[in-house]
Each structure stands twice: as structure tokens, then as C-alpha cells.
């Protein structure tokens, strides 16, 4: 099915989604998504895992299975992975200390894609994983993702920094140096979005970034938000250059007359 192949492409790029994320991306009903995912899992197209927690259990996490990975390999002309390689790959993903971070980054972009499904004229035109970002930015900076979002005639191209408060705020603020270097290398202004874990974390980071030369010179546009953002397209972004919070698309330059 075309939708299945599209989902395999997304999983190849972004590694893992929860059931509700897949439903938001491509289905009208959660139970329909569950049924299709289970069917693909039984056929080996997808693999699933979750931690047992009490009471109840986590949502299933979905990744490429052996058949799905073989399809991607055949499409791309790369060696087909063996069952042992796939088991190791899935086990490493399930046990990764960065799994929560990866799911959080993916949830951000899923929120944009879901918004676009129901908002005429809204589009998530670009969605890159950390791996794809690194292929472009090299060692200058390591974004968690890159996107291009269009709504109401405005297009905002941005880099995403998804912060879970696992490193000092000074180190997070220092990432602006890398984006400033990327600006110098490309000659184009850069927009950077910071998703912070708490309001206090957001306030601390904004204070540290306020006087950065790249901000005062207009080379970088930086906007922040704290806590979960189920609708990243909405009026939740606090730009460092202006008061209040605005929609994501409003971070873009105004359309030309």
C-alpha cells in the first residue's frame, strides 16, 4: 500500500514512532492505525517494542522490521540486513538512553505534520533527522532536526534544538556559536528553535543568549518554548527579538509584496 511504503520511508529516516504518532501522521482513527501496525508487524514489515510499566504499559514503539528493512535496501540498492543485524539494531534502539529524546524530537515534527493534515494551505515541506542534518552542517553544529514550515503565505525554515535538561544551560547557549558559524559559511540568516523542558529552563537560556553577537547582529533568529508542544505551529514561540508569543510561521520574514 502507498501509505505503508511512505511509513517505511519515514521510519528509515527517523527510526521510531509511537502508535499515536503514526495515527496522527496518516490515520483518521487510532484503532485503525493500531490494526494496520499490528498487521505489518505480523508480516515482519515492522518491529515493535515497549517497556513494561505498572499500572498498564507504554504505547508500542514501532521501527523497521526485517521485511521493511529489506524493502528499503532493495529500493536503495544497498546490502540487505540479516536477521541477526536487525535484532541487534532493534534491541539497541529499545535500550538507547536517547530513545526518549528521539521520540520527543519526532513528536515535534509529527505535531506539525498532523496540523498540516487539517489546515488548508499549511505544509511541512522539509523534515530532516539529526543524521540528515549532520550531512549538511558537518561539524559546525549538530541540530536535532530541520524543517521547513509554510502557513498563511509565510515559510519558516528552521533548525530544532530539543532540550531535555540533560546538559548545563551554558552548553546549550553555546550552541549559538555553531549556528553563527553556519551563517558565516552559508551567508544566509538562520532560524533556531529551542524546545525547553521547563519555564525556568527557558528563562535561564534566554537570559544567557540575549547578548550573543549573532543575535544582536541579526544573523540568527531564535525562538523558545517550554514544556510539551502538541501544536508546534501555534502561538507558542517567544522570539528573542520581540515580546510575546507568536505562531511558528510568523517567525519567517514577511512575504514580499
Image: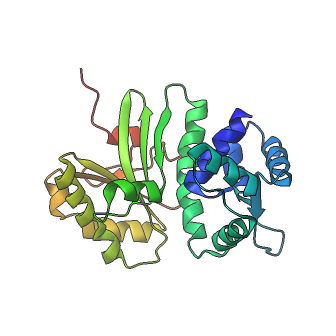
Q: Viewer-proximal residue, 89 or 11?
A: 89
Q: Residue at x 53, y 52 (%)?
A: 108
The quarter of the picture where residue 25 lies is: top right
Residue at 30% x, 69% y: name it: 173
> Is the residue 170 above or below the residue 226 in the image?
below
Asked whether, in this view, residue 155 is left or right of residue 40, the answer is left
Measuring from the top left, give residue 136's x and y in whole percent: 34, 53
Q: Is residue 90 left or right of residue 133?
A: right
Residue 168, image x and y in percent?
Answer: 37, 79
Q: Is residue 23 above or below residue 58?
A: above
**Residue 158 visible to the viewer:** yes
Q: Is residue 46 left or right of residue 178?
A: right
Q: Residue at x 31, y 76 (%)?
A: 170
Evaluate whether residue 242 shows in this view.
no
Q: Position of residue 84 (x, y in %)?
A: 73, 70
Query: For residue 160, what is the image quadrant?
Result: bottom left
Q: How many marks?
A: 0
Q: Residue at x 34, y 71 (%)?
A: 172
Q: Quadrant of the C terminus?
A: top left
Amino acid at each position: 500500500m502507498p501509505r505503508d511504503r511512505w511509513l517505511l520511508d519515514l521510519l528509515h529516516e527517523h527510526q521510531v514512532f509511537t502508535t499515536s504518532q503514526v495515527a496522527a501522521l496518516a490515520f483518521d482513527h487510532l484503532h485503525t492505525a493500531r490494526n494496520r501496525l499490528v498487521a505489518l508487524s505480523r508480516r515482519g514489515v515492522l518491529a515493535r517494542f515497549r517497556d513494561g510499566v505498572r499500572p498498564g504499559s507504554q504505547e508500542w514503539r514501532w521501527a523497521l522490521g526485517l521485511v521493511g528493512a529489506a524493502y528499503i535496501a532493495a529500493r536503495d540498492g544497498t546490502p540487505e540486513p540479516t536477521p541477526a543485524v536487525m535484532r541487534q539494531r532493534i534491541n539497541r534502539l529499545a535500550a538507547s538512553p536517547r530513545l526518549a529524546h528521539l521520540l520527543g524530537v519526532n513528536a515535534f515534527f509529527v505535531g506539525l505534520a498532523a496540523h498540516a493534515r487539517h489546515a488548508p494551505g499549511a505544509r511541512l515541506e522539509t523534515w530532516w533527522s539529526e543524521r540528515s542534518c549532520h550531512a549538511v552542517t558537518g561539524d559546525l553544529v549538530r541540530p536535532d532536526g530541520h524543517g521547513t514550515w509554510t502557513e498563511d503565505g509565510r515559510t519558516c525554515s528552521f533548525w530544532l534544538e530539543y532540550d531535555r535538561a540533560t546538559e548545563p544551560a551554558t552548553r546549550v547557549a553555546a550552541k549559538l556559536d555553531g549556528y553563527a558559524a553556519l551563517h558565516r559559511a552559508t551567508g544566509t540568516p538562520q532560524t533556531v528553535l529551542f524546545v525547553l523542558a521547563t519555564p525556568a529552563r527557558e528563562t535561564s537560556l534566554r537570559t544567557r543568549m540575549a547578548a550573543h553577537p549573532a543575535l544582536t547582529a541579526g544573523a540568527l533568529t531564535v525562538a523558545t518554548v517550554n514544556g510539551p508542544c502538541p501544536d508546534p505551529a501555534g502561538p507558542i514561540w517567544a522570539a528573542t527579538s520581540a515580546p510575546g508569543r507568536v505562531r511558528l510561521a510568523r517567525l519567517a520574514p514577511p512575504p514580499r509584496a
